[in-house]
Image (spheres, grey):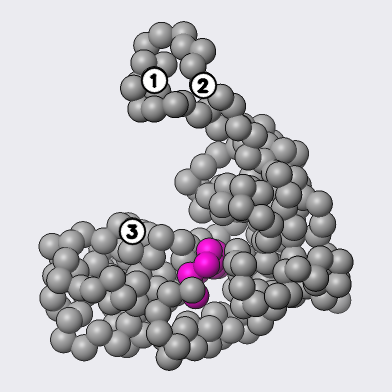
């Protein structure tokens, strides 16, 4: 069987954040050699390779470094040491309501998101139609997003990101929101993408990871302490099966 190509590679990646007590001290550090800060090592010598079409859960306690890994995959953060390689279009189900322009309609926000991603013409039209159908907001799709409830904004955010034809789908607790019917709709869509050989990275504290992921990377205090199949992980660390 031919080995699938690497689509995400972390090569001895470390990330150190500089933490200040308040914004005043952080601002002062721009001009003076301030020593009023702490250094927090979020990741330490982390290495792994994820191949095209894999569905991988990243688990660990709060502060383990999961969010830092996701930020690097999505290009929001960069390593202090080491290298991160990501190939293809990334769609991130993280802050689902972030980036909306409140005075623009739902339809206009879909189009705006597509433009930001560098999409054009027929592809934008196709994604717009799919997102509108998925969000199922009725006449509200042509109303300003500022008039939406929080639940409606979440529906729109999920609908946009899940339908942008990603090569890599990043999910961070996104399925903990919405009503039961919408959650099922979201899960069905993710399962559909997995069947289409889309690479999925899923961070969650719920049992959802068992439904989608075949492999699990366990982080503890910024280090990879286990990387194996989902079954091996749950046998070794049964607390994550609860």
Query: Looking at the image, which is closer to me, 126 or 228?
Result: 228
Q: CA distance from mark 3 to mark 2?
A: 29 Å
Q: Is residue 171 one of those drawn in magenta?
A: yes
Residue at left offset 40%, top offset 79%: 178
Query: Looking at the image, which is closer to me, 108 or 233?
Result: 233
Residue at left offset 86%, top offset 72%: 235
Percent from the top left, x then y, of residue 209? 65, 74
Where does label 2 land, which residue? 37
Quadrant (top left, top right, bottom left, bottom right) of the N terminus:
bottom right
Where does label 1 land, which residue? 25
One can see residue 176 in this view: yes
Percent from the top left, x then y, of residue 53? 67, 72
Q: Residues within 10 Å of mark 2 (few under 14, many from 20)?
A: some
Q: Residues within 10 Å of mark 1 (few under 14, many from 20)?
A: some
Picture quarter containing residue 201?
bottom right
Percent from the top left, x then y, of residue 163? 42, 76
Where does label 3 land, which residue? 98
- What residue range appears in magenta? 165-175
């Amino acid at each position: 069987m031919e080995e699938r190509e690497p689509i995400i590679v972390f090569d001895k990646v470390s990330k150190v954040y500089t933490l200040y007590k308040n914004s005043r001290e952080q601002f002062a550090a721009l001009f003076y050699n301030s020593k009023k800060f702490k250094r927090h090592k979020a990741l330490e010598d982390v290495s792994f390779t994820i191949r095209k079409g894999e569905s991988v859960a990243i688990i660990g306690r709060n502060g383990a470094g999961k969010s830092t890994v996701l930020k690097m995959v999505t290009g929001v953060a960069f390593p202090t040491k080491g290298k991160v390689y990501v190939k293809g279009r990334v769609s991130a189900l993280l802050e689902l309501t972030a980036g909306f322009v409140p005075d623009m309609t739902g339809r206009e926000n879909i189009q705006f998101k597509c433009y930001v991603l560098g999409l054009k013409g027929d592809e934008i039209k196709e994604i717009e139609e799919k997102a509108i159908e998925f969000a199922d907001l009725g006449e509200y799709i042509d109303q300003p997003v500022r008039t939406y409830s929080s639940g409606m904004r979440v529906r729109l955010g999920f609908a946009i990101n899940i339908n942008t034809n990603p090569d890599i789908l990043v999910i961070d607790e996104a399925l903990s929101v919405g009503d039961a019917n919408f959650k099922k709709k979201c899960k069905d869509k993710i399962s559909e993408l997995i069947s289409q050989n889309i690479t999925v990275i899923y961070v969650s504290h719920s049992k959802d990871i068992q439904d989608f992921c075949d492999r699990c990377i366990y982080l503890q205090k910024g280090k990879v302490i286990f990387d194996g199949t989902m079954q091996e992980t749950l046998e070794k660390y049964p607390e994550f099966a609860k």
